[in-house]
Image (spheres, rainbow, N blue to C red):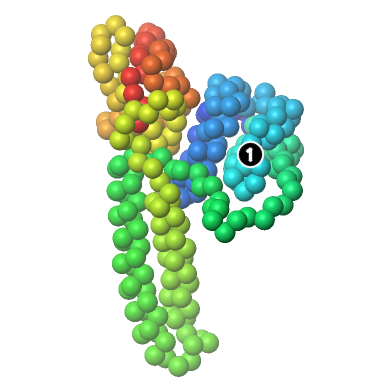
Amino acid sequence: MTETQNDRPADLTDAAVAYLGSLSSGKREAVTPAVMNFVRWYGAHQSIDKIAPPKLGEYAESQPSGEDGAAKIKAVREMLAFAARQNWISSEMSGHLKVRKVVARVRSSNSRPAVEKLVLTTDKQAEMTAELAGLKERRVHVIDDIKRAAADKDLKENAPYHAAREEKARLDGKIKELETLLKHAVVGEQECAAGTMADLGRKVTLKETVSGIQRTYLLVTPREVNPKTGRISPVSPIGKAVMGRSAGEIVEVVAPACTVKYLIECIE
């Protein structure tokens, strides 16, 4: 079925948010920095159907060589593949993002691969830490289930034993994923860092230029939106206005009744 105009995202930011919202929490946390960096580089308000192969090639060339650059390009290619499945762009578009070939070098024993830091709010860090603790507790119970099921010597036809082993493998994978994310995470609510841009996971403090009223919002995926607690999506009027912008900038939020100007006071 051909995608209708109403189904097509308004711009590249909307498309990126739709893609990130389709991912598991762990995968989303891992690829959000690369995806949103691409959106800012290409133009947050650029229409996705205007993406052109030459500029994709230019983006690929601008990325660092090695594993870090390859990971960023892969994240963007997967987003473009998602867009193609939605019939927003041609299925051939992601093929124009190619990893730069480099001459292999011997790595010194003291060198370490670069790790993309994940920016988490303190609430998100606490949520992930609690989830990790729960998974570890569940793993202890599953190991007990394995031991009990193993008491039946006929393991070949022992369905409870095999089900418990599969559950343990699933838990081990999720535990490792969360431990890695938390290990490399940076809590982004400690200070207003100069040069920081508004994107998913950032807390943005705005001041209305006329009234001086101050408001703080947390940019989250559509599935996590809760206006009562200030959790808004980048596709909302305010989210769309601040996405990719920096502290000190004036933005205009277009509402049905009027247009309001805000000063971005802080991005955490």
Front one among 34 and 229:
34
Q: Is 225 situated left or right of 79 in this image?
A: left
Q: Residue at x 35, y 14 (%)?
A: 263
Q: Give how far across and how far down residue 73 sits, in percent.
A: 63, 41
Q: Quadrant location of residue 193?
A: top left
Of the 4 image quadrants, the one containing the C terminus is top left
Q: Give how far across and how far down residue 132 sits, in percent.
A: 35, 58
Q: Residue at x 54, y 47 (%)?
A: 114
Q: Residue lying furthest top in this view?
A: 210
- What amino acid is labelled 1 in the image? Pro
Q: Disc 1 marks which residue? A: 64
The answer, for residue 53, to whether it is visible in the render is yes
Of the 4 image quadrants, the one containing the N terminus is top right
Element on which disc 1 rests: loop
Q: Give how far across and how far down residue 31 sits, in percent.
A: 52, 43
Front one among 116 and 171:
116
Q: How many marks?
A: 1
Q: Is 66 placed above or below 247 here?
A: below
Q: Is 200 placed above or below 239 here?
A: below
Q: Quadrant location of residue 86?
A: top right
